[in-house]
Image (tube, rainbow, N blue to C red):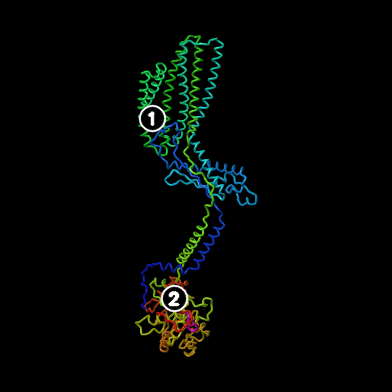
Amino acid sequence: MRNVQPTNGQNFQETHTLRDYINLVKLNFVPIFLISITGLLVAIIYAVNAPNIYKSTTVLKLSKPQGSVLQGSLLPEFQDFGSDRFIANEIEVLKSYKLRSKVAKSLVDSFSVSTSKDKFSLIFEDPNLLKEGRFKLKSIDDLVRTLALKVSIDQKRGLDIVEVSVESQSPLEAMMIANCYADAYKNINLSYNREQLTRVKDFLAKQRDEKLSQLSSVEETLKNYQEQRGIVELPEQAKALIAQSSEIQAKMNATKIDLTISEKTLNQYKDELRKRNPELNNYIENMASEPYIKKLQEELADNKAQRDRALRDAGPSSPLVKRVDQKIDELTQRLNNQLSVFKGGILAATPDEIKKLTSQVLEEETKYQALSASYRKLNDINSDYDKKMSALPTSTTDLARLQREKDAYEKLYLIVEERYQESIISEQSVPGNCLIIDEGLLPARPAKPNRVLIVIIGLVLGVGMGVGFAFIRNYLDNTVKTPEDIQNKNINILAWVPQIEGLETGNKDFEFIVAKKPDASASEAYRALRTRIKFSKLDKEQMKVILVTSPTASEGKTTTALNLAGSFAQANFKTLLIDCDLRKPRIHNAFNQKRFPGFTDYFFGQASYEEIVRPTEVNKLNFITAGTIPPNPSEILGSTQMEAFFEKLKGEYDYILVDSPPIIAVTDSEILSSVVDASLLVVSANNTEMELMQKAVELLNHDKSNFIGVILNNFTYRSGYGSYYKYYYYYSRPSTGSSKSKIKI
């Protein structure tokens, strides 16, 4: 086997294959199994004890408001603008505190009238108390917070469909809350859409009552005046003048009401637009007061007044009425064209979120200016009629004025009543933009928990955590674990020796395993090591003196030296084991002998050579103990006496195994490595740190390098780790048949 050594300063990139990961899992099978079982048991316990959760869903279709059925779209080209934003806004309304509080109150009311108190769950602070006949309801605020957690509101992708899903331990409660959500939102949505129309209706209702009261007062005044003066009839001239004047006055008052409604609506829109974009609001005001538009509006008001006179004087079929109508259409078209130009310019540069509001302000501002012009024109006409009324005879003037006022209030009341009824129809005709497609149904089976899925997830998470533990443990563990760890560092490995059973517990009976139990897997490993050492260096005639050391203490160097020496002796080689660990010698304990006399005593002339060489139970195996511990071990081991002593031993033995101290701790082993024929480094699996092993190899690789490789001690075999490791367990069983199979080296 060729000795491959790492080159100083050269870094080797460590790579991992699938087999390495599989081996890692197998080496950590027990913790992975335990963690996986724990995860599975936790999942099973949770799945068994988890309460049933029922789910009810109501489906809503939301669309942008289109106004009442009596109105058309102000800007048809913008009808589909901002649908996604609109849906997002409505979802926030569904999630609002106001709506949840309405649902919470409805739920409490339903509970109050219900005869089945056990059909509820979320409403209780502790549902378990209900089994004992006691319960305590949550406050409205607590219930509102609970609804925020138990209700999910989601939009179906790409659609105007919103699903409101409710989860509860009670199926009836889940259905009830889902339907309460839909109803509460529908009512709020309807009130939002009808808000402006409702405001107009309420205003017209007040005006109707006010005009009716004024009409009654005028009628009573007229009646009293006629009775006091004895005047019953008016002249025909006065009657005609009163009819014309009362009609104009009624129209003027009706226009004033429309003007008031428009002003309130416009102020509302302006306040909202001013909050968002003050500059745009000022621009629209200046645009609506633009001279050309004001001129068109004044001309329209004047022509409408002319049409009213023509209708009164000549009838609807007269040529004058037709000419005036044609003029009105022409002026209206010109005004609309001019407004369209302004709309296009404004809306093109307006942010998307306020386009609709801008359009509303623009429309209402134009309407308000037109009504103002009409009111001024009607007021001028009414002033003319006042002058004509003043020209009547004195006896009929007061009566004519009262009659005109009565007729005007009658017509005005009829107009207001008609407008009021229209506003009611308009308000009720607004359908809202929420359509309940599917109401929440009573769930027949629980939606949660999916117990099978929970168990599967628990098992998967358990396995994942177990494997993760193995990888983290491997990442943090910087010890040598497998032969591949040594090979990946480009260090020659001679053999891997399995644990000797019982040795880790302190039982020394089988430490000399090759003598006590020759058929054990460890004994077979030492014999394989012996063979590899014999053929590890072909450039020397024979390696007689072999040093055995380790990076640190308790890694098995003494056990390795002992069994390797026994293996050479069993191969009919005359072998000597010498204990050169002058710090903590232990060879004498392995043979149950005393430490004195040893080779240091021989050096100091306190014992003869024959006294220090002791036989063992294994034929052709002798050993020499350390003897007296000197104060200067390094100087003795590096002395010429030591070299002469080794030369003397070479003449008598085929192999001399030298047990030495750990090479990282002291320099004794480094000194000995320069005078021996070969050096072995013993590392312990799952104990020796990788950095210490590499440092020990560097110390042994000096100028007079005789380092031939590493022995991995205490290597624990795992089934399937590698087919070439299985011989350990093959030879660990006693042979019951004919002959043993021979190990392949």
Badge number at residue 186: none
**Amino acid type shown at disc 1:** Met
Q: Name the residue under label 2.
A: 726
Spot occupied by residue 608 in the image (x, y as percentages of width and height): 48, 90
Quarter of the image containing the C terminus?
A: bottom left
Spot occupied by residue 518 in the image (x, y as percentages of width and height): 47, 83
Q: Mark 1 points at which residue?
A: 287
Disc 2 element = loop
Q: Residue at 44% x, 38% y: name it.
A: 64
Q: Which of 666 and 279 is in front in this view?
A: 279
Spot occupied by residue 188 in the image (x, y as percentages of width and height): 51, 38
| Residue range of the region highlighted in magenta in the rendering | 513-520
Q: Does the magenta stretch include residue 516?
A: yes
The quadrant in which residue 7 appears is bottom left
The quadrant in which residue 65 appears is top left
Q: Which of 572 and 277 is in front in this view?
A: 572
Using the rendered image of the protein, determine whether residue 37 is visible from the camera's viewpoint: yes
- Nearer the observer: mark 1 or 2; the answer is 2
